[in-house]
Image (tube, rainbow, N blue to C red):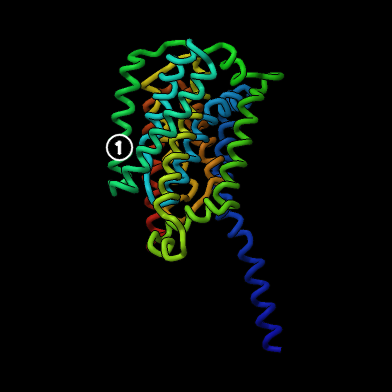
Amino acid sequence: MKENRKGKLEMKRDISSKPIKILKSNYVWIILSLFWAICIIFTKEFQNAYTYRSIFLLAVPLLFATLGETIVIISGGFDLSIGAIIAFSTAIASETMGINVAMGIVAVIVFGLAIGAINGLGVVKAKIDSFIMTLGTMFTVNGIALIIRPIPGGFIDPIFSNVIMFTVSNVPLTIIILFIIISIVGVILLQKKNFGREIYAIGGDKEKARMNGINVDRIEFLAYVISGGLAAIGGLILAGQIISGDATIGLPYLFNALIAVFLAGSLPGVGGFFSAIPAVLFMVSIRSLIRFLEISTWYDFVVKGVILVTVIAVQQKIMRR
């Protein structure tokens, strides 16, 4: 009898805790839905399908960068170079596509992977703190990008741009496909593959991960290489959208990616990419709302700065508990 009562009590607790579990795992989706609902009520622009088309166009390059940042942060590091890599990629693309489109695409991705490898070697082999290492890389890469492309311009192949911006009935088909692909790849990579499990293990406790047979240096190095490659692909997509190279375009992408990662709840050893997807859409939607309200774009940094500090403060409080 006592065992039956105990079992019933446990079942009741499980049932009552289910809504809380659902809320905890989907809170960013709820925030995004509420934000869109409020925007739809109070602004005409968010009642227009074209607004959401613009949001997805802006979101895809950021989503690529955010996946790379998520992987690095869960592994226990930081990658402050992703914004510079995005800007550098647009600059490289604008210089090389005039010679050969395929060469331009390959050059951008190779440079992105190479920059990620430099970050990885600095952190893993030279034992430089990831914040300092990637900060130095950010300044260096940004400087090189400005030398290559001191003012926005250059040549982006129209065929490449048309493929990126391919639209059917006002739906940016290529962008939607890329959004879906990178979302699925990100979730599977971190939650279903051994690489993802090893990333969580390293972020949780490096020494324990080593004791369990994980090649910590190799996985950590790969995290930075993947981050650099993903940022480069994001830069390629952005170059196709703006049809030029721009060495000054990267900083907002770093800022937005970091906020999206923290808003999604990712920290060393914990978090995931599923919640980063609505976080990216939320970041882009805030920017769109500020533009529609016709107020200074600097308010975008103010609002997101407040969000970043608030999110980190809440996370710190939860971690202390």
Identify which amino acid the numbered label 1 is placed on. Answer: Leu
Residue identified by numbered label 1 = 135
The residue located at (47%, 50%) in the rendering is 265
Horizontally, residue 158 falls left or right of residue 151, namely right
Q: Position of residue 182 (x, y in %)?
A: 58, 37
Horizontally, residue 251 falls left or right of residue 179, namely left
Residue 311 appears in the rendering: no
- For residue 123, above or below residue 152: below
In this view of the protein, which residue sits in the foreground, 93 or 53? 93
- For residue 237, above or below residue 123: above
The residue located at (59%, 41%) in the rendering is 185
Residue 65 appears in the rendering: yes
The kind of secondary structure element at disc 1 is helix
- For residue 269, above or below residue 307: below
In this view of the protein, which residue sits in the foreground, 126 or 162? 126
Numbered-mark total = 1
> Label 1: few (<14), some or many (≥20) within 10 Å?
some
Q: Position of residue 39 (x, y in %)?
A: 56, 32
Q: Position of residue 257 (x, y in %)?
A: 44, 37
Q: Position of residue 238 (x, y in %)?
A: 50, 23
Report the quarter where the N terminus lies. bottom right
In this view of the protein, which residue sits in the foreground, 79 or 45? 79
The residue located at (46%, 65%) in the rendering is 212
Report the quarter where the C terminus lies. bottom left
* Displayed quadrant of residue 268: bottom left
In this view of the protein, which residue sits in the foreground, 71 or 45? 71
